Image: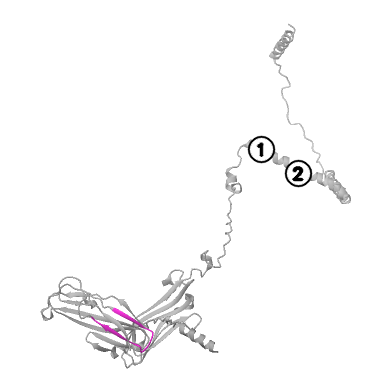
Amino acid sequence: MTPKYLGANGVDGMEINGIIYQYTAVKDKEDDFTVTVQNKKEGGGYVFQDREDWSQKYGMTIRKAFAMPYTPLATFKEDGGAIVTTGTGSVENAQVVYLHRFNRCFDPQTDPNCTGYVTPLPPEPPEFDLYDALDDEFVEEATKELDQDLIDKDKKKEEEESEEKEEEENLETLLAVGDNPLTMGDDFTQSSIIAQMNAALNISAYYKARIPSIVYNEQLVMKEQKTLGNSKRILRSLAQDQLHNQMVEAQYQ
Amino acid sequence: MKNFIVTLTLMLAVSPVIAENIYINGDVESRCSIVQDTAGRWGNPSANVLTTLPASGGQVPIIRFDYSLANAYYASISTPISFSTSPSLSDSTVFTGVVAVTQTSSSDMSGYQAASTTPAANTRQYALTVAGTTWFSATSVATHGGGNSTPFPSGSYTGIVVASCIAM
């Protein structure tokens, strides 16, 4: 007997309350022969055991029924059922039938009508990884501004923000002077000393520089020293003067 | 004193006689019960034969005796010697029957068959010496026409197996 014959949930809640067995003892009357029908118990011992002594008796078919208190199926050891014989003879057409019931309240939580049923708490909502498209680098790349004006505008904005930030920091520094003037004074003193030292080094390099005294002679010689005049220039100039005068006079007409 | 005696005499003289029946009830449950385990059926392997043998299409009736007292009853089982209902028969019918122990609830009953008696030709009687349950089979064969092998007329045939618990 295994739970699979009693359904998928054959162990939990299944209880045995009776056993009927039947077999035919085949033997000669004068032979000694015993037959024991038994079920081992989980943890040792037997949950059911019945022995029939056929010694010096005619062999024939026997059928016996036993009532039991409701015994959980789990008490019966799996594969612990057996028909054990001793002596001369054999057992044929053996059948063992277990009378059972299903105790649906074995686990009270299976049925709200069972005693001890506790209304279960609602399950906790599952946590989902929400997708934020604004955090997606591919979306960000796809929606990147391509208009140069907009880009420049953003850069300008960033620069303005950077300048504002810098001014705030300077202001904070100045305000911090009041809190720690000695420290700031030391810093300014040291900075001025270092600056003077650097300036002296920089100027001394010029003092030490030597410029070679080389004479650069004129290499280009202009062969023709005559300046060419433009004969049309005087006429054009006069024409312009005349036009100018006409325009001035036109204002008074 | 004299007046008292006279008065008592008068009272006794006029008092009526009163009688009442008081009943005692009781029930006795049978310690032996008989149950039909399997119904019987005649098969008709040949025209003039009716038999309960399964090989011939019949079914042997099984009778179960449940008895809670040992050495208190006899189980008496009789096979049919005539049809209780049948078409009109033109010839004689010969009945034979065999009663046997088929199952017991204890190996101690295995000697019932050997110890049984036949108080009548068609009756077998068993001494129920061990409390428990015993199953008996009653095989019946009816042959029509004797040596002439006259066919049974068509119709429905019924026979009765009588099983009884008889107090020792």
| Residue A32, quarter of the rendered image | bottom left
Question: Is residue B73 magenta-colored?
Answer: yes
Residue A76 pos. (x, y %): 47, 78
Number of other residues with Cα within 10 Å of mark 2, as a class: few under 14, some 14 to 19, many 20 or more? few
Residue B33 placement, left or right of A171: left
Q: Is residue B78 above or below residue B155?
A: below
**Range shown magenta:** B62-79
Q: Is residue B117 above or below residue A213?
A: below
In this rendering, the label closer to the viewer, 1 or 2: 2
Q: CB of mark 1 within 8 Å of CB of mark 2?
A: no
Question: Is residue A129 magenta-colored?
Answer: no
**Residue at 51% of width from left, 87% of height from top?**
B6
| Mark 1: secondary structure | helix
Sequence-earlier tag: 1 or 2? 1
- Answer yes or no: is residue A198 visible: no
Task: Give the main secondary structure, helix, strand or loop, of the magenta stretch.
Answer: strand
User: Which disc, if any, is residue A165?
Assistant: 2
Q: Nearer the viewer, residue B107 or A3?
A: B107
User: Which disc, if any, is residue A152?
Assistant: 1
Residue B149 pos. (x, y %): 12, 78
Quarter of the image where the C terminus of chain B is located: bottom left
Q: CA distance from mark 1 to mark 2?
A: 20 Å
Chain under numbered label 1:
A
Quarter of the image where the N terminus of chain B is located: bottom right
| Mark 2: secondary structure | helix
Q: Nearer the viewer, residue A56 or A45?
A: A56
| Residue A129, quarter of the rendered image | bottom right
